Amino acid sequence: MSAPRLRRTGSRPETPAAFVRAIVLAYQRRGLDPAPALRQAGLRLDDADRDPTSKVAIEAFEAFSALAMRELDDEALGWFSRRLPWGSYGMLLRASLTAPTLDVALRRWCRHHGLLTDDVRIVPRVEGKSCVVGISEKAPAGALREFCLVSLLRNVHGVSCWLADSRIALDGTAFTFAVPPHADAYGRLFAGAVTFDGPEAAMSFDAGYLRLPVVRDDDALRRLLQKPIALMSRQYRQDRLLPRRIVGLLSTDAGLPADAPDIAERLNISVRSLQRHLREEGTSLVALRSRARRGRAEALLGASDLPLKRIARLVGYGDEASFGRAFRSWTGRTPAEYRRSMLLTCEPASAPTETA
């Protein structure tokens, strides 16, 4: 059967049609007809179209995926040498709910995934300040390889976000296959840098997220399982570490980003999303910039003998007087008083006197 044409019948297309074609292939390998499920999802086939860059509405993709998982009784949609019956991924999530932190939950989820299939191994590891989740391919996925690796990483990312109730900002995602014709869609699927033709399929993020507590329970899981596909196909909304990441940006030696567009660009999100996240966290760029300036000022005062005028400029103030007023409002002390207190704290204790 030649490549199907997939026409959207709903909203703006956002998902590569190649992923829908991969599900069609899974049907064909099982000797089943995908046409009824395609029609129910609002998609239709046209053998005349072989456009590898076409896309479909995300709602239609989610609907077709959900129907296919049930009809094929395979939540892996044909990726592996054996099926993952309906409910498999829900079982993995349930086993992770009792973990105290995302670190424990993620490792548990990946370990249990290895009990379901030998075709891949998903292993999280910490490298410096980053957590890297890598996939080792143990059996060839053939024509479903791209769909398999993309879906697995999206699944791991979505599960991690959901367990901690935080959008986890990705620093980068890498794939072992060549750049696909629809590579432009990867920017929506994986925020951050995306590379191809690498040695390992993997994603990386700030290891600080691993310390977040698991906040979900059985009731939340039951609600999620009513519409589980969105966890894999859509970006999670709120980033609970966003204020800390912004403070980190504002504290760099490279200088303070001037405004919201600069910060949003560095975080790879829109200005509107940045502002919404800050409102949800009950803070603002003004407050975070003040926090960053205070942290950097305290570090410079405690670890250097730079003149106060120089420190004022490094922290972002035009003169020593305005810096002094700001510092006093933060700490209740002048910069000079703070420096003296730090010097006293760091002085070695005097040698004990000898006794008879």
Image: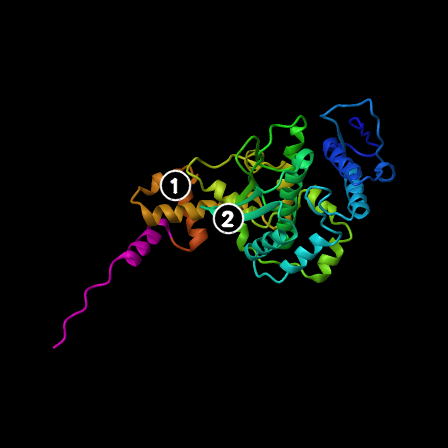
Query: In the figure, 72 relative to 92: above or below?
Result: above
What amino acid is labelled 1 in the image?
A: Ala
Report the disc number at residue 328. none
- Please indicate whether residue 210 sits to the left or right of residue 332 in the image: right
The foreground one among 323 and 346 is 346
Report the disc number at residue 125. 2
**Chain part drawn in magenta:** 334-356
Disc 2 to disc 1, C-alpha distance: 40 Å
- Which mark is first along the chain, 1 or 2? 2
Tell me the SS state at disc 2. Answer: strand
Figure quadrant of the C terminus: bottom left
Quarter of image, res 13: top right
Residue at point 66%, 59% (across, down): 216
The location of residue 190, given as percent across then percent down, is: 62, 38
Query: In the figure, 223 relative to 10: above or below?
Result: below
CB atoms of marks 2 and 1 within 8 Å: no
Judge whether residue 266 is colored magenta: no
Q: Crowdedness of circle 2 by 10 Å Cα count: few (<14), some, many (20+)?
A: some
The location of residue 86, given as percent across then percent down, is: 76, 52
The residue under label 1 is 312
The foreground one among 344 and 69 is 69
Pair 2/1: label in front: 2
Quarter of image, res 172: top right
The foreground one among 354 and 326 is 354
The location of residue 354, given as percent across then percent down, is: 14, 72
Residue at point 62%, 42% (across, down): 153
Figure quadrant of the N terminus: top right
- Please indicate whether residue 355 sits to the left or right of residue 283 in the image: left
What amino acid is labelled 2 in the image?
A: Arg
Residue at point 48%, 44% (across, down): 248
